[in-house]
Image: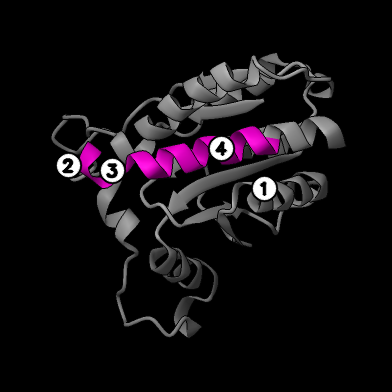
Amino acid sequence: MVGAHYDVARLPDGTVVGGAVDNGAASVVLTRVAESLKRHELSHRVRVVLFDLEEAGLLGSRAYVQAEDAARVAAMVNVDVVIGDETLMYGPTSHEGNDTVYRSLRVACAVSELTCMGFPRYPPSDDRPFQAAGIPNVSVAVNDAAASHQMWLALNLGAQSGLREGFVPEVFRIIHSSRDTIEHVSEAAMNHLHDLVVALVLELDRSL
């Protein structure tokens, strides 16, 4: 299964954000992934799922998992946030039971010639209900190289990160705000993400 959420955050005044970074771009990419996968002979049936209510507490993906037979899902790839073009961030690598997925991802990174960075701690998204159900999974996002390193330090080292006091990664200043617009998403990033996800699904199809 490959998934992304298509809902957007609501601001305190009741308006909704544009949601291009989080998570419109990824939703569009997955429609292209579905088209590309039709050209391949696969051993597994692949579902491309767009979830609602991620921003309300992962309600859509939780309901989906509760209604699904977990034994029928070999793996889940969650795509959330497209804001750069140089580095694929993935995680949380501290979760157990995902070794085959992470191994396949590293192969896909090499095939797609995209730098990949594993995060032991990683922002929660629609991967979490699948993890709770014991379904192998990974969550991925695309960001700039420097911003990816800053985000890794902020999330995984805390006070020992070496970042200035009060530092907030740029992606967190954009998502869930009025700044989340299409200007922060590049066509190159979406193309690279498409290639990576297709390569990952093909590798998982061979490995699982």
Residue at point 26% right, 50% down? Answer: 174
Residue range highlighted in magenta: 182-200
Q: Position of residue 48 (x, y in %)?
A: 59, 20
Q: Nearer the viewer, residue 28 or 42?
A: 42
Q: Is residue 178 visible?
A: yes
Residue picked out by circle 2: 178
Q: Is residue 171 left or right of residue 59?
A: left
Few, some or many residues within 10 Å of mark 2 (<14, 14–19, 20+): some
Q: Nearer the viewer, residue 171 or 25?
A: 25
Residue 86 part of the magenta-drawn span: no
Residue 52, image quadrant:
top left
Q: Position of residue 94 (x, y in %)?
A: 70, 59
The label nearer to you, 3 versus 4, is 4
Q: Amino acid at mark 1?
A: Val
Q: Earlier in the sequence, mark 2 or mark 1?
A: 1
Q: Earlier in the sequence, mark 2 or mark 4?
A: 2
**How much space separates mark 3 and mark 2, taking CA atoms?**
7 Å
Q: Nearer the viewer, residue 70 or 194?
A: 194
Which mark is drawn over residue 176?
3
**How much space separates mark 2 and mark 1, taking CA atoms?**
36 Å
**Which element type, helix, strand or loop, lies under badge 3?**
loop
Residue at point 81% right, 50% down? Answer: 99
